[in-house]
């Protein structure tokens, strides 16, 4: 037996097919299904009005179709965003490139909850060989956050990101330029080179693109996690664990 959602989809398809056939068939002959419908069709004003009335009547009687369409659009956009996030070559990632589960974390180095989340992120990645983490700097808390993010991204070019990231995330207090430079030097970063690279347009572009991407999937707050398309806003271990379990179960099927 067909469910109501299936019936609705068949009904919509039937309405469109009937409308097209009625419009394209000669008035004196019965409408028959053509081998292939034309790519374009020209409707008279009366035909267009009839089609509009049919569709309006159907949608009024079955408004859940609009919800289904909106959900489908959201799913499509999330799928596109996940591809963009997981394949971003400019972002640092940790874990197998072909891992079935990807945790994307948007964070700010001055965000208290991001500080708290760091241990969970690294512990989860170390404990599981099916998880990859993508680190996305999302500086939202002022100029110092932006400088720290630029410095961290610049350190990728020196192969020092991971140690420097942990140093920045563990720091308590202002992230002014002397503090950033001191933490960078402690992580083995060539500070002079880092400062030169921080001025590159590519780093500005990456941060701007990251803000756009975060807005597409859930907003500008940090931390923001996306686990195989599942959004967890803030640091909530229970919700993160649930999202991981669901992603793992889905990956096994």
Image (cartoon, helix red, strand yellow):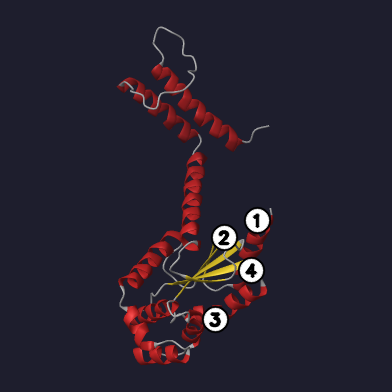
Looking at marks 1 and 2 on the same chain, the residue that comes earlier in the sequence is marked by 2
Mark 1: which secondary structure? Answer: helix
Question: Label 3, on which residue?
Answer: 116
Marks 4 and 1 close (CB-CB < 8 Å): no
Marks 1/2: CA distance? 9 Å
Near mark 2 (Cα within 10 A), the count class, few <14, some 14-19 or many ≥20, is many
Marks 3/2: CA distance? 22 Å
Marks 4/3: CA distance? 15 Å
Marks 1 and 2 close (CB-CB < 8 Å): yes
Q: Relative to residue 166, is residue 40 depicted above or below? A: above
Near mark 1 (Cα within 10 A), the count class, few <14, some 14-19 or many ≥20, is few
Q: Relative to residue 17, is residue 92 depicted above or below? A: below
Q: Quadrant of residue 150?
A: bottom left
Question: Label 1, on which residue?
Answer: 250
Q: Out of 127 and 58, give the one closest to the viewer.
A: 127
Question: Label 2, on which residue?
Answer: 228
Near mark 4 (Cα within 10 A), the count class, few <14, some 14-19 or many ≥20, is few
């Amino acid at each position: 037996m067909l469910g109501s959602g299936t019936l609705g989809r068949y009904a919509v398809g039937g309405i469109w097919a009937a409308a097209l056939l009625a419009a394209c068939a000669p008035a004196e002959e019965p409408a028959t299904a053509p081998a292939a419908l034309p790519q374009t069709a020209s409707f008279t004003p009366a035909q267009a009005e009839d089609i509009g009335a049919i569709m309006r009547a159907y949608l009024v009687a079955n408004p859940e179709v609009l919800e289904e369409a909106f959900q489908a659009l959201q799913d499509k956009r999330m799928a596109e965003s996940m591809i963009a996030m997981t394949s971003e070559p400019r972002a640092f990632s940790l874990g197998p490139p072909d891992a079935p589960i990807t945790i994307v974390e948007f964070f700010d180095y001055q965000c208290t909850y991001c500080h708290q989340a760091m241990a969970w992120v690294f512990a989860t990645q170390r404990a599981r060989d099916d998880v990859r983490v993508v680190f996305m700097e999302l500086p939202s808390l002022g100029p110092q956050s932006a400088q720290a993010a630029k410095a961290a991204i610049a350190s990728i070019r020196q192969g020092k990101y991971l140690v420097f990231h942990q140093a920045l995330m563990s720091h308590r207090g202002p992230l002014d330029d002397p503090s950033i430079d001191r933490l960078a030097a402690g992580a083995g970063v060539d500070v002079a080179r880092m400062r030169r690279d921080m001025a590159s347009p590519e780093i500005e572009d990456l941060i701007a693109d990251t803000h756009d991407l975060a807005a597409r999937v859930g907003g500008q707050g940090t931390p923001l996690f996306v686990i195989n398309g599942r959004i967890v806003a803030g640091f909530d271990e229970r919700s993160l664990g649930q999202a991981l379990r669901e992603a793992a179960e889905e990956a096994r099927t």
